Amino acid sequence: MAEIIKRERLVPNIHCVEIEAPEIARKCQPGQFIIVMPDEKGERIPLTVADWDRESGTVTCVFLVVGTSTHKLSFLQAGDEIPVVVGPLGRPTKIEKLNTVMVIGGCYGIGAIYPLARAYKNLGSKVLTLIDVKADYLFYWKEKFEEVSDEIFVSSRDYVYDCQGYVPQILKKILRERKQKINRVYASGCTYLLYTCAQATQPARIETIVALNPIMVDGTGMCGACRVTVGGKTKFACVDGPDFDGHQVDWEELFARRKSYFDDEIQSLCYWERKTFP
């Protein structure tokens, strides 16, 4: 059993959970994830590690409340215990000193890109951060990103920021107007965000790494549920990724596979809500 140290709502529908897991905290690196079960009858779900404290032995994850398991996780409080925490899993993100790196995050992916921005900054790279939100109040961890970013851009649909519009529009504008070349783009968030980022950078031939989020069960390469096609070859996101070349991903297949259990998930959530809140 692993103890919940803290669980808080960051913005509507997005929560942060800090879990006591000394062995994971000691080994995890940017880009890796953990598998958790919110209760003994729950499913195994992957959560990208958004931060860690090696001294206190805790790992922090940011998650979007969307299905039954994430709903259950969002009701846990400090002091509660969860039966399964496995990790760190997946291959760490390739981090090396580059002149300029852009990290892009939306929704739960905002938390996921934080350790990458910090790692690149610590190596001396210039870090550009592009955050995708529908409105200003959905941008969480602003202060944390200000500490590790040289410049912050916000793709929004309100009038708080200058960068109004969608990520591909803002990204294309940045690539077009910047005199200094961006050496690498890294994106984390929903599948559509990853797809549009890869499409926007492909004409400029900028290396674009995306953290894929296919359906995942086992997390160690045994079940095959997370298979994706990259460069015409079958890969497993849990052991070969989750980072892949965004210009080589078969996006049409990934979109289709993510819908496999859509109806089942809705039925599961409805059943749990009726049982929990009669």
Image (spheres, helix red, strand yellow):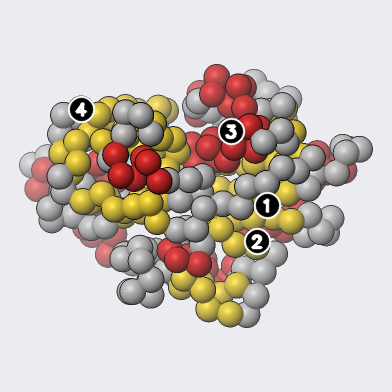
Q: Nearer the viewer, residue 103 or 107?
A: 103
Q: Residue at x 15, y 34 (%)?
A: 80
Q: Amino acid at mark 2?
A: Gly
Q: Residue at x 32, y 34 (%)?
A: 58
Q: Secondary structure at mark 3?
A: helix
Q: Quick check: 116 left or right of 58?
A: right
Q: Amino acid at mark 1?
A: Cys
Q: Residue at x 55, y 48 (%)?
A: 188
Res. 239 image quadrant: bottom left
Query: How far separated are the C-alphas under marks 4 and 3?
Result: 27 Å
262 lies above or below 155: below
**On residue 246, which mark appears?**
2
The answer to whether the residue labelled 3 contacts the one labelled 2, judged by CB atoms less than 8 Å apart, is: no
| Residue 100: percent from left, percent from top | 77, 39
Q: Which comes sooner in the sequence, label 3 or label 2? A: 3
The answer to whether the residue labelled 2 contacts the one labelled 4, judged by CB atoms less than 8 Å apart, is: no
Q: Amino acid at mark 3?
A: Arg
201 lies above or below 249: above
Q: Which residue is mark 1?
A: 197
Q: Which comes sooner in the sequence, label 1 or label 4? A: 4
- The residue carrying pointer 1 sits among few (fewer than 14), some (14 to 19) or many (20 or more) residues within 10 Å by Cα, namely many
**On residue 118, which mark appears?**
3
Q: Quick check: 112 left or right of 85?
A: right
